[in-house]
């Protein structure tokens, strides 16, 4: 497993952006919110942050929301890079923004748009190179932006058809973290069957289901959970029975001995050796 110097922060969607009338919630957002962690990992409020709303069907509005959110945190150098085609990923000014960024933040929406419009481009190559070689460089993504970080990317699938072959649609993502398959909005949208089939297809990979307003800080082949929800880990590397390859589509699957772990704020997981560090029960809630 390659050891990358940069940091990934996948987020399960619907992260707190500090857009609340109640001052108490705004203070929580500034002190403890996921975007606060993004800014801190990128070097603080002077970091160059580039927001890419490519996945969204309303990129202008989404870009404005992130401008407001990062400004609320005190950030001064924020750009929105509105990539709407593969050609946009080859524009000199866009490439320059990515080269100079301390943090690149992908919005939610449709992860296939990220794969199709950025995958294989010069910007994609720069992101891969900088994540591999530059300590302190951060790539964050929420919902679709998180799912696109994987090599084997969940592209869609109905939760109502869970645990049957064909319920999940897979696609090639950006390949930033090839060891993981990431799904988002996990608890609220009941996506257990979707990630189970994804892991059945790729049993050597670890499936992660991220709840909303929950994220991971991934660096040095380890991740730590941040945010208010939970992360479900699906480890299929010791599956004993997996009939996915011989089933017809629409047929219920059989999987045995797939390990699952439920992790929350402060818990850590070593992707390389699968060791878990759980926050002690007596530790104060953060």
Image (cartoon, rainbow, N blue to C red):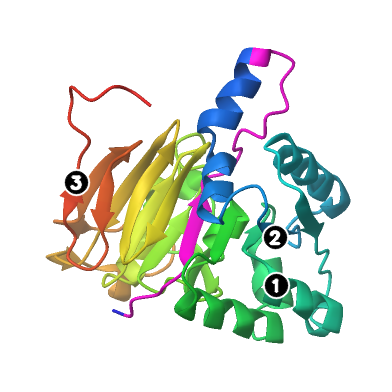
Which residue sits at x=31%, y=66%?
221
* Chain part drawn in magenta: 2-23
Q: Is residue 215 left or right of residue 222?
A: right
Which residue sits at x=28%, y=22%?
284
SS for tag 3?
A: strand
How far across and how far down the image is residue 283, in percent? 23, 25
The majority secondary structure of the magenta stretch comes to loop
From the image, state whether disc 2 or disc 3 is nearer to you: 2
Q: Quadrant of the C terminus?
A: top left
Q: Earlier in the sequence, mark 2 or mark 3?
A: 2
SS for tag 1?
A: helix
Q: Is residue 19 above or below residue 270?
A: above
How far is mark 3 from mark 1, CA to CA?
35 Å
Which residue sits at x=50%, y=43%?
160
Q: Mark 1 = which residue? A: 100
Magenta stretch: includes residue 16 = yes
SS for tag 2?
A: strand
Of 30 and 183, nearer the camera is: 30
Q: Is residue 227 above or below residue 123?
A: above
Q: Tell me if residue 247 can be seen.
A: no
Tag 3 and tag 1, C-beta contact below 8 Å: no
Q: Mark 3 = which residue? A: 277
How far across and how far down the image is residue 215, in percent? 46, 45
Q: Quadrant of residue 82?
A: bottom right
Q: Is residue 40 left or right of residue 17?
A: left
Q: Mark 2 = which residue? A: 48
């Amino acid at each position: 497993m390659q050891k990358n110097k940069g940091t990934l922060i996948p987020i399960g969607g619907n992260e707190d952006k500090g857009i609340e009338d109640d001052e108490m919630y705004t203070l929580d957002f500034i002190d403890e919110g996921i975007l606060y962690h993004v800014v801190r990992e990128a070097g603080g409020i002077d970091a160059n942050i580039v927001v890419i709303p490519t996945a969204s069907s309303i990129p202008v509005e989404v870009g404005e929301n992130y401008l407001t959110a990062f400004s609320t945190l005190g950030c001064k150098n924020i750009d929105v890079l509105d990539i709407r085609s593969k050609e946009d990923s080859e524009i000199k000014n866009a490439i320059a923004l990515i080269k100079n960024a301390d943090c690149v933040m992908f919005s939610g929406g449709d992860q296939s748009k990220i794969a199709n419009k950025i995958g294989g481009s010069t910007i994609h190559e720069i992101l891969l190179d900088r994540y591999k070689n530059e300590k302190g460089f951060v790539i964050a993504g929420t919902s679709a932006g998180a799912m696109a970080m994987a090599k084997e990317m969940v592209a869609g699938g109905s939760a109502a058809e869970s645990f049957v072959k064909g319920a999940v649609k897979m696609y090639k993502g950006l390949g930033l973290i090839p060891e993981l398959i990431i799904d988002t909005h996990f608890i609220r949208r009941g996506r257990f069957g979707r990630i189970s089939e994804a892991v059945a297809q790729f049993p050597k990979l670890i499936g992660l289901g991220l709840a909303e307003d929950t994220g991971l800080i991934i660096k040095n082949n380890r991740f730590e959970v941040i945010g208010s929800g939970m992360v479900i880990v699906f480890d299929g590397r010791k599956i004993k029975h997996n009939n996915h390859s011989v089933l017809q589509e629409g047929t219920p699957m059989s999987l045995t001995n797939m390990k699952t772990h439920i992790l929350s704020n402060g818990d850590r997981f070593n992707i390389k050796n699968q060791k878990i560090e759980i926050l002690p029960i007596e530790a104060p809630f953060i």
